[in-house]
Image (spheres, rainbow, N blue to C red):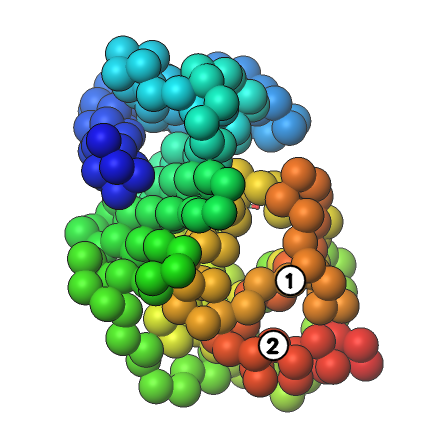
Amino acid sequence: MNDRTLCWHLSESVKQAMEYAMRSGKAHEIVGESCLGGTTRYFDKVAETAVVDYLAAHKIPCELVSEEIGHVSFGDEFILYLDPIDGSNNALYGLPFYCTSLGIMRDGSSYGLVRNLAWEEWYEGISEYGSLYNGRPLEHTPSSCMISLYTKKGKYIEELQDYISKIRCLGSVALEVCYVAKGSLLAFIDVRDKMRTTDIAAAKIVLESAGGVMTGLAGEPLDLDENHVNIIAAYDAKVHASLVRALRG
Ligand code: IPD
Ligand code: CA
């Protein structure tokens, strides 16, 4: 099974599991803590378990790195980064903007799928090839000026004054970064010391395959083994450079 087919099947398992959990009436119940300290709700767990079960049943030889459970080893052919449901609060409270995020890293290649679970829309990034939107080459929306900003205690609001009336914060990081890849958002900036690999791995592949740039706030490369990072994801290198300059003050 190739990476695209695998990720599609996994996203389908997540979708069905999530729909089942939503119907159960206990989707919101807290059932534990994620390996990095956040809250795990019933529907996060059910969605993640669907992926774990699929990987085990089909003997997929990967190292799974997932938001709730952490690392699970089924083999060592590739790494699969998973955020079963990104935008859990949106999903729970009826804001139709949430997704599942799957990123495969192999030696020399990568593939990412970010699938909107609220309506049919999906983004793929294929290294060495490019990005796809709903299965077709991704076309850029011309020149959005909106920025998604996740701040803490107003950090960087001053530096981003020029963009202040165009700031958004939509509640699903992976989807927002894909919207940057498409050009619906000019950039995505998160300065909360909070981003985890599982949040951004798949979307980073989509963005970079589309010609976008994702780095730390000073323009440094991101270390995907690190969690609690800050990021700038920009539509292209020019936008990226001007935002790095703006944040420098
Ligand atoms: C969350 C969303 C949200 C962001 C949080 C993430 P989750 O993901 O992406 O937009 O503010 O930092 O944790 O918890 O729903 O997977
Ligand atoms: Ca999640």
Amino acid type shown at disc 2: His
Q: Residues within 10 Å of mark 2 (few under 14, many from 20)?
A: many
Judge whether 64 appears above or below 198 on screen: above
**Tag on residue 240?**
2
Direction right: furthest residue: 249
Judge whether 225 appears above or below 113 on screen: above
Foreground residue, 75 or 114?
Answer: 75
Residue 58 position, x and y percent, is 26, 16
**Tag on residue 215?**
1
Residue 169 seen in the current view: yes
**Tag on residue 155?**
none
Q: Residue at x 20, y 58 (%)?
A: 134
Q: How many marks?
A: 2
Q: Would residue 86 be found to the left or right of residue 241 on screen?
A: left
Residue 12 position, x and y percent, is 21, 33
Q: Would residue 49 be found to the left or right of residue 169 on screen?
A: left
**Which quadrant would residue 196 be assigned to in this image?**
top right
Ligand 1 neighbours mark 1 (CB distance < 8 Å): no
- CB of mark 1 within 8 Å of CB of mark 2? yes
User: Split into 4 quadrants, where in the image is the C terminus?
Assistant: bottom right
Residue 63 position, x and y percent, is 49, 24
Amino acid type shown at disc 1: Thr
Q: Residue at x 56, y 23 (%)?
A: 70
Residue 78 position, x and y percent, is 46, 31
Give the mark nearest the N terminus, 1 or 2. 1
Q: Secondary structure at mark 2?
A: helix
